[in-house]
């Protein structure tokens, strides 16, 4: 695929963008509907936690399994079936009638959302010219971030049309529309040529005209073999720590909102439209993801001009420093509110300009085609486990030691990810290319 743009490139980019948008919508809309289903089903705090954690738990399982299955049966085949099942899952989620049906539908939607990360990563990488992979991946992550404010806008619009007991169901069913569009588009696209070539080579080596008997566990073991162990640990650890911080920072939202007085702003809508418009979570999610989107948008124009690992390293470093200073600000009791906003913007910009894109891209390009899906799936799945831990544990830590401690802890985790990125650079620059994975795409 070198030298000229492969056919179907634009359609592949649109398809994978739809995939990442759907995954983002499922994750980000989760916090918007929590209070509504909790009220309708009279859930306890424990049940709310279970329902909320069902999505990242499902995503963790889906990413790992889909990554390996993509290497065994093909990327395209799984994408087609996934998008169709997502349509069904959206409908089932909207029809949830009690706590158990709610958790089941959320586990299913989370699982399918998790599968889209390795599937879209592998398919895009193999169906796009190498010179365009980084930019296209950055566009995908921008679309993924865009899903959050879109989910907020959808919630606000629907709140003008539906009462509260129906609103959360309508928000849930909305992702059936892009899922159906993605399903129809995916049926028109072919399987990855690289995967087909690799499958034919494996079949030939096995002395057969068909693929050898699939073995899910073998591919996962290879990731931790001597040849790939170091690179897997570095990639997996960095993405895991980033997702803890990425989702964990949401617990800082109330304190940011107090600074910029969004409460009084959103409350002014209460008497004009619907009570959801005074919901602090919706406005907070909208504002935070505007900041997220600035970094993700900038990455589209920068990612091809900067070495990927350098971009990841310094993204983690500046994000860590900004949170460290933010924690120090709150511990000191200072009253310069503009400093809170500036440091928060720096954190969001640094994290989305670098690590949000590079963890996704490096996990797709640091392995050969035979285990690319498995590698990306393992890394993405473990990252979603990080988001699950963040959702589960950080509120408890905040209750015990305060939000200042949570922010400081997140700063330390991001600095650890910075150290792992330094180690990753050493691993990939090693002279012993026979025992380490080689990055198939590098920026200048």
Image (cartoon, rainbow, N blue to C red):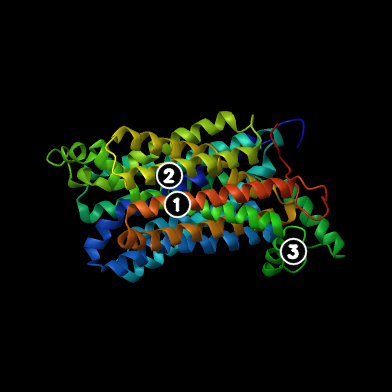
From this view, report whether residue 352 is shown above or below residue 100: above
Identify the residue at the far front of this view.
332
Secondary structure, mark 1, is: helix
Q: Earlier in the sequence, mark 2 or mark 1?
A: 2
Comparing 75 with 306, the one in front is 306
Residue picked out by circle 2:
323
Splitting the image into 4 quarters, where does residue 300 fall?
Answer: top right
Query: Is mark 3 in CB contact (under 8 Å) with mark 1?
Result: no
Q: Which residue is mark 1?
A: 410
Residue at coordinates 67% horizontally, 56% vertically from top-left? 232
Q: CA distance from mark 2 to mark 1?
A: 7 Å
Q: Is residue 5 above or below residue 255?
A: above
Instruction: Pick the residue in front: 23 or 315.
Output: 315
Label 2 close to label 1 by CB (< 8 Å):
yes
Please tell me which residue is depicted at 17% across the width and 41% down the height of the picture.
267
- Which quarter of the image is occupied by the N terminus? top right
Of marks 3 and 1, the one in the foreground = 1
* Total numbered badges shown on the rendered structure: 3
Please give left or right for residue 273 compared with residue 256 in the image.
left
Q: Callout 2 environment at 10 Å: few (<14), some (14 to 19), or many (20+)?
A: many
Element at label 3: loop
Q: Vertical placement of 4 versus 102: above or below?
A: above
Which residue appears at 53% of the width and 64% of the height?
61
Which residue is identified by label 3? 225
How far separated are the C-alphas under marks 2 and 3?
Answer: 36 Å
């Amino acid at each position: 695929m070198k030298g000229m743009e492969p056919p179907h490139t634009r359609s592949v980019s649109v398809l994978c963008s739809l995939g990442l948008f759907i995954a983002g919508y499922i994750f980000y809309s989760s916090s918007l509907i929590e209070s509504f289903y909790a009220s309708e089903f009279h859930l306890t705090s424990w049940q709310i936690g279970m329902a909320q954690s069902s999505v990242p738990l499902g995503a963790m399982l889906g990413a790992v399994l889909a990554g390996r299955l993509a290497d065994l049966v093909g990327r395209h085949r799984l994408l087609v079936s996934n998008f169709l099942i997502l349509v069904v899952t959206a409908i089932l989620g909207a029809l949830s009638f009690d706590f158990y049906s709610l958790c089941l539908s959320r586990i299913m939607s989370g699982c399918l959302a998790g599968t889209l990360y390795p599937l879209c990563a592998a398919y895009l990488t193999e169906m796009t010219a190498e010179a365009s992979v980084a930019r296209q991946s950055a566009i995908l992550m921008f679309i993924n971030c865009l899903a959050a404010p879109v989910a907020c806008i959808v919630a606000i619009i629907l709140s003008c049309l539906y009462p509260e007991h129906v609103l959360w169901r309508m928000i849930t069913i909305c992702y059936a529309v892009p899922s159906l569009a993605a399903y129809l588009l995916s049926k028109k696209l072919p399987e990855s040529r690289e995967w087909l070539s690799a499958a034919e080579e494996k079949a030939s080596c096995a002395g057969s005209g068909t693929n050898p008997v699939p073995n899910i566990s073998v591919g996962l073991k290879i990731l931790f073999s001597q040849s790939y162990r170091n690179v897997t640990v570095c990639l997996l650890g960095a993405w895991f720590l980033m997702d803890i911080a990425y989702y964990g920072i949401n617990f800082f939202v109330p304190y940011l909102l107090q600074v910029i007085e969004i409460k009084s702003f959103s409350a002014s809508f209460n008497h004009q439209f619907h009570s959801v418009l005074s919901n602090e979570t919706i406005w907070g999610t909208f504002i935070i993801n505007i900041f997220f989107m600035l970094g993700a948008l900038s990455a589209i124009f920068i990612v091809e001009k900067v070495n990927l690992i350098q971009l990841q390293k310094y993204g983690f470093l500046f994000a860590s420093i900004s949170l460290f200073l933010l924690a120090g600000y709150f511990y000191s009791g200072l009253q310069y509110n503009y400093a809170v906003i500036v440091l928060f913007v720096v954190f969001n910009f640094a994290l989305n300009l670098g690590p949000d894109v590079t963890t996704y891209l490096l996990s797709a390009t640091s392995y050969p085609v035979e285990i690319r899906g498995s590698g990306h799936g393992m890394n993405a799945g473990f990252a979603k486990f990080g988001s699950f831990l963040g959702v589960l544990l950080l509120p408890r830590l905040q209750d015990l030691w305060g939000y200042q401690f949570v922010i400081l802890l997140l700063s330390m985790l991001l600095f650890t990810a910075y150290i792992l990125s330094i180690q990753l650079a050493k691993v990939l620059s090693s002279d012993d290319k026979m025992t380490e994975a080689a990055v198939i795409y590098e920026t200048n």
